[in-house]
Amino acid sequence: EAGVAQSPRYKIIEKRQSVAFWCNPISGHATLYWYQQILGQGPKLLIQFQNNGVVDDSQLPKDRFSAERLKGVDSTLKIQPAKLEDSAVYLCASSLDREGQWVEQFFGPGTRLTVL
Amino acid sequence: AQSVTQLGSHVSVSEGALVLLRCNYSSSVPPYLFWYVQYPNQGLQLLLKYTSAATLVKGINGFEAEFKKSETSFHLTKPSAHMSDAAEYFCAVDNTGKLIFGQGTTLQVKP
């Protein structure tokens, strides 16, 4: 079974530029998560999708970050414009539908973003 | 509000020695608790989980953790470290449908 795919793996941009990350979850997984992992910290949830609807985006900086999950499969996370403090690894994860039960999240390898 | 504190950002052990990574949590209700491992340039992998069943939880690669409610702890142990255990380890809590991670502990294994 293929895991969670992310691209690109690495990205270097200058501040005020725009950048987009792509995630393809495990086939059949209804729930998709984007996390931000700053160096020296644990991952922080940015946004959670259930199919193509947003469940939780309370920690997404909506003035510069946006995310979509058209057709309830792939997802794109965009930053526009980027700031120095956005340098981090962006992790995508997916899981089966929770339906009130705990379900394991499976993580992709992440995209390492460096903002200069 | 939930939170997780991992004591020690770096732990160094010799190969064959006991591994002990410490995690304390704060939660107003009985939590689900997890340990994840992250190898360089890879995503997180679930090591083990506590979901209110047995308090001693066994995971992959010989790791185990014990839930101690009185101490609000969920420390990760392995009797004998291998070089391949060198990685970053994250403790996490989930009782609202959202994973809250600690800041991580880097495990170094010396030959």
Image (cartoon, rainbow, N blue to C red):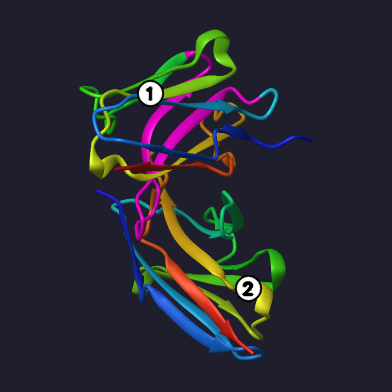
Residue B85 numbered mark, or none: 2
Which residue is painted at 39% across and 68% down in the image? B69
In reply to whether residue A36 is colored magenta, the answer given is yes
In reply to whether residue A46 is colored magenta, the answer given is yes
Q: Is residue A87 above or below residue A31?
A: below
Q: Which residues are magenta?
A: A29-52
* Image quadrant in which the C terminus of chain A is located: top left
Q: Is residue A10 above or below residue A16?
A: below
* Image quadrant in which the N terminus of chain A is located: top right
Which residue is painted at 38% across and 54% down in the image? A42
**Which of the 4 quarters of the picture holds residue A68?**
top left
**Which of the 4 quarters of the picture holds residue A77?**
top left
Compare residues A94 and B97 and report the one nearer the observer.
Answer: A94
Compare residues B103 and A9 and report the one nearer the observer.
Answer: A9
Residue A78 numbered mark, or none: 1
Q: Amino acid at mark 2?
A: Asp
Counting every numbered tag in the picture gives 2
Q: Is residue B81 above or below residue B98?
A: below
Which residue is painted at 58% across and 82% down in the image? B109
Whole-Å distance between the Cαs marked 2 and 1?
A: 34 Å
Q: Give the chain of mark 1.
A: A
